Amino acid sequence: MSTEILQYGRVTWTNIIHPTDEDMQALSKRYPNFHPLHLGDCLTELEFPKLDATDGYIFLVAQLPRWDGDERICYPSEVDIFVAKGVMVTVHAGNIKPLNRLFASAQTDDAERGRLMGSGASPLLYEIIKTLIDYCDPILNKVNQQIRHIELSLFKADTEHMLYEMAVARRGVIAIRHILRPQLDVVRELEKGDWSFIQSQLDLYWDDLSDHLTRLLGVLNEHVEVISGLSDTIDTLASHHIDGVVRLLTLITILTVPLTILSTIFGMNVTLPYEDHPLPFYLIVMVGIALTVWVVWYLHRRRWL
């Protein structure tokens, strides 16, 4: 539980980490127009981003992909934002590194605090969302490195290992896309909105963020197509390997058929001609070898080998 307040000119930025009921009660007393449902949303993790606009403020739920290096997957990190005239409130779990750095820089650097908060709360909102979206670029670079590694190792590494790497990469891309796609709708709502406490000259900036998100989603869609193509290639390699194994086992089975037939005939519990003579044994062996050689020649001639 941590509540920090920054003041610059007419703008107040309240940053709450790990919110509790007491934090929300204090926030409600400080800003009585904040709806209880919005305050309650800050205590729970929502599944999708959203934007609710009232007469006096905007309540925004933004989500950011957070990279887990051990599992190589992104999990959503949520930040709840209240924006009113001269008021900025951010509520989060403290695991959003770019937001933590942004608030820390505003705390310690007077020039940075003036840049972020000197023009009002709505430009500060733009800077926060821009920072969150920009943080997605290095995450996509990590995913791109994964896919590049798969491309380079496709014909070198074990097929089973490559299938695992492919599944991990696909899971990572889908997770990021699942987080970012709803965020695009929120940014477009900010672009189209008409609120007195959101400066209209920011429309071009919201449009720029919308384009950035669209580009990120386009890159993710391309990654999905690349992974699908690589997956088809791996499936082809695996199928070819299985075909080779089946052909080898079939060949072994076919080669043993002549010998099996001869051994079956002479293994019957009946009296056979020349069974006491020493030459038939060698003749049987030669016939078995000849039949085996003929089978190999025939299969090779038919290009089955």
Image (cartoon, rainbow, N blue to C red):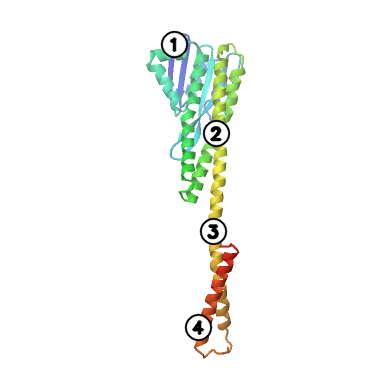
Image label count? 4
- The amino acid beneath tag 1 is Tyr
Q: Residues within 10 Å of mark 1 (few under 14, many from 20)?
A: some
Which numbered disc, 2 or 3, marks the residue that appears first in the sequence? 2
Q: Residue at x 60, y 64 (%)?
A: 302
Which of the two residues, 124 or 301, is positioned nearer the viewer here? 301
Question: Which residue is identified by label 4?
Answer: 282
CB atoms at circles 1 and 4 under 8 Å apart?
no
Question: Which residue is identified by label 2?
Answer: 220
Question: Which residue is identified by label 1?
Answer: 8
Q: Quadrant of the C terminus?
A: bottom right
- The amino acid beneath tag 3 is Gly
Vertical side of 145 occupied by 197: above or below: above
- SS state under label 3: helix
Q: Position of residue 14 (x, y in %)?
A: 46, 18
Which numbered disc, 4 or 2, marks the residue that appears first in the sequence? 2
**Quarter of the image holding residue 207?**
top right
Q: CA distance from mark 1 to mark 2?
A: 39 Å
Question: Which residue is identified by label 3?
Answer: 244
Between label 3 and label 4, give the one nearer the viewer. Answer: 4
Which numbered disc, 1 or 3, marks the residue that appears first in the sequence? 1
The residue furthest left is 108
Which numbered disc, 1 or 2, marks the residue that appears first in the sequence? 1
Between label 1 and label 3, give the one nearer the viewer. Answer: 3
